[in-house]
Image (cartoon, rainbow, N blue to C red):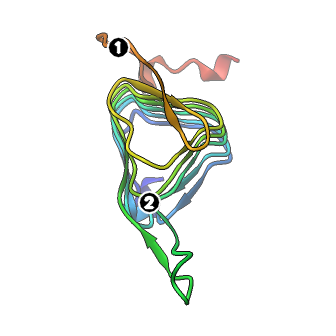
Amino acid sequence: MRWSGVKASKNVHFYFGFTVRNPKGLIIEDGVNIGPKCLLDARKGLIIRKNAVIAYEAVIWSLNHDYNDKYFCGKGALTEIGEYAWICSRSIILPGVKVGEGAVVASGAVVTKDVLPYTIVAGVPAKVIGKRERKGYQYGYHFKDDTSHLY
């Protein structure tokens, strides 16, 4: 990924079949897991902070169309996923959204607004359904501890 312009730590795990739009706009910090069939749109910038987990078929956008523009032009903004956040399967994060540290986005949720740290959101559009405990979480991908080849 680095040869394509992605700024990624050595301790990042990508499963097969993901897509990146504008690799030069993508920053991935240490310990991140990116699941299969994810779409990461970094055309306006995408930052994924330490130890975040992006699950199967999640879609994270930084750019979409302005449906009120007569030319249907694109508009967007930097999108950010916080440390220890969990973006569950088949959820969608829209452009310019910041998902806070330790936040959880439930499967199938469509996130249209920022998610506060340690908040759990679900639904379409996503709404707060709970709080996650603040702990000294210790998970994250570590290259030296990788045993995925055993499964």
Q: Amino acid at mark 1?
A: Tyr
Left or right: residue 100 versus residue 37 is: left
> Residue at position x 61%, y 22% from top?
148
Number of residues whose C-alpha sits closer than 10 Å to that of mark 2, classed few (under 14), some (14–19) or many (20 or more): few
Return the residue nearer the eye: 58 or 13. 58
Name the quarter where the C terminus is drawn.
top right
Gap between marks 1 and 2, in whole Å? 31 Å
Q: Which mark is residue 3?
A: 2
Horizontal placement of 70 versus 47: left or right?
right
* Disc 1 element: loop
The 10 Å Cα crowd at callout 1, few under 14, some 14 to 19, many 20 or more, is: few
Q: Residue at x 68, y 47 (%)?
A: 17
- Residue 144 locus on image (x, y percent): 43, 21
The residue where tag 1 is placed is 137
Q: Nearer the viewer, residue 140 or 145?
A: 140
**In the image, residue 61 above or below residue 31:** below
Q: Position of residue 142 (x, y in %)?
A: 42, 24
Q: Sequence order check: which comes first, mark 1 or mark 2?
A: 2
- Element marked by disc 2: helix
- The amino acid type found where label 2 is placed reads Trp
Give percent across and percent down for residue 22.
47, 66
Residue at the spot 39% in from the left edge and 28% down from the top edge:
51
- Is 3 located above or below residue 10 in the figure? below
Q: Observer-nearest residue: 129 or 12?
A: 129
